[in-house]
Amino acid sequence: MINVNFKNHFTVQWRSFAQLAFLDRQISGFFIFLAIAFVSVWSAFAAIIAVLINNSLSLIIKDYTLQEWRLGIAGYNGAIIGMYWGDSILSIKGLCLFLITLLVCLFLEFRLRALLIPRQLPVLSLPAMLSILVIVLTISIFSFDPNYLFFTGKAVPILQTYSREIAIILVVSAMAYQYPLATLQTLGVSLVGGLIAQWFTGLNFYALVDLWAINLPLAYFSIKTLFLKHSSLSTLAATMNTLLAGCIWFFWLITGLEQLSAPLLFPFILSSLITLIFFRRYKDHNLLQSELWRTFQLLLLNRLKAKHCVAITGSGIRKGALPDYPSGQWLDPKVPITSYTLAEFKASKRCRYLYWKASYDYYQQALTMNKNNIDKQLDSLLNYYLSGLFTETVDSLLTNEQHPIYECYGSIKNLYCLDCAQQQAWPPVPLWLQRDLHCQHCSGLLKPQILAADENIDPECYQALQTNMANCGSLLVIGVPAVTPVVSMIIENANANKIPIIFIGTLPSTYLLEAKDIQLTGDIANWLTNINWFTNILHPLKWYCKWKK
Ligand SMILES: [Zn+2]
């Protein structure tokens, strides 16, 4: 096995150095090695020895997969230990400490991987940091030499003055070679972080070098280019990680932990583990969905432009507890759907019976329903934000005292006269089983006040729809499972006027989302709660802007 991999060996050593900056190219590793050598020749020397030892041992003890080994992941913890002890290895004591730390590191790496990998967390440079801390604390407890408490290496830079600057340029070049844009962002973020820390702590910019040159860049760069590379939230997560790393570093400073040990890479390691755990747990949370923030942006723009927001809801707001009305789920499947038209209702006594029967069953089901959380959210949205609310449901559960709610297909809770259109309540006993029901005013035929397939939408509702869409800034389509004629009309109106549509719950089947549209999939009540929360924040804006509601 070792022979087979021997030809890879050379590449792997350089890649281990590249891994120090979360890169995996040979040339990047060489640049980083040069950077270390510019700061301290002996650190570079010790680092390459440690990398060789770790990579070779890892092939024997097989703590890494071949794939990981090839990427150089087995070696970078050794490189850190080499860098730490590098300036001391010329003495026997220093050399012993270096080798012991390396052994402790290998052991910790083995244990930490067994602990963290099943939890989908990387070990980062935790083994190196912990082993250094263990050794340094052991020395100080047994008082061999308190000087080892601090990293007081006798560094031998190649150049007297500009070594550190050249080292930073080399590392940044290696990073930019693989990820130019992320490197630029990282530079900006860490410089800002460094300047803020300088202003905040009053310390010299160079005294803060481990903050802005090591912890902050790694915190940003690693999340952005590796750990959450493919997530749409990588920039947010990377920024939060950088902030957290800065806070931990500052905590280290003010609590006096620094007396015990320099922060080294601990702020970066701790913040990254916290960020990754937090992200894995909450990545599906509404507030972490970019679509919700697009929605907020849209709502804010609408408010500033004094544009209205119109909503149409469908059977999705009943969470499947009531059959979908427009698709005819409530009708007897054994009866042909053509028997349920208004023409048949007028013409045939049998069809009237069938219509009454299906309607009465639906009415009974609707009576058992209570307002759910979605109704409450819609109610408050209607009070503070919506200019109009249209619904495809016929259960009349949505009610509001101040604002009308348009039930596009009528209400199952009423009857109406086919001649004079007067409304009436259901009779307390099912009289329709025996005979036709007639209007109290004109003796015309009564019918449940829901639209049959061949009936047209109520002109008042149609008019309200047109008026509302005229000054509409965004359209909410909530829990609408399919494109019905009414939905089609309202969506076509929005598309023709380039009005963004926010689909909440589900996307109507066969509808193709446009770039201007937003899709919030999942629990409707949760999304509406978030939107309500945001519109409440927007509410005071009405004092500053001309807002018509
Ligand atoms: Zn009548």
Image (spheres, rainbow, N blue to C red):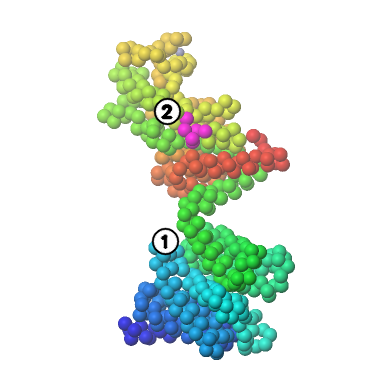
Q: Quadrant of residue 106?
A: bottom left
Q: Quadrant of ligand 1?
A: top left
The amino acid on which the numbered mark 2 sits, given as a three-letter code, is Met
* Front residue (pair 298, 183): 183
Q: Which residues are magenta?
A: 371-376
Residue 89 among magenta residues: no
Q: Quadrant of residue 176?
A: bottom right
Q: Residues within 10 Å of mark 2 (few under 14, many from 20)?
A: few
Picture quarter with the C terminus: top right
Residue 119's disc is: 1
Residue 1 visible (yes or no): yes
Residue 369's disc is: 2
The amino acid on which the numbered mark 1 sits, given as a three-letter code, is Arg
Q: Position of residue 207 (x, y in %)?
A: 68, 74
* Kind of element beneath mark 1: helix
Residue 15 visible (yes or no): no
* Kind of element beneath mark 2: loop
Residue 406's disc is: none
Mark 1 C-beta closer than 8 Å to ligand 1:
no
Q: Position of residue 477 (x, y in %)?
A: 49, 40
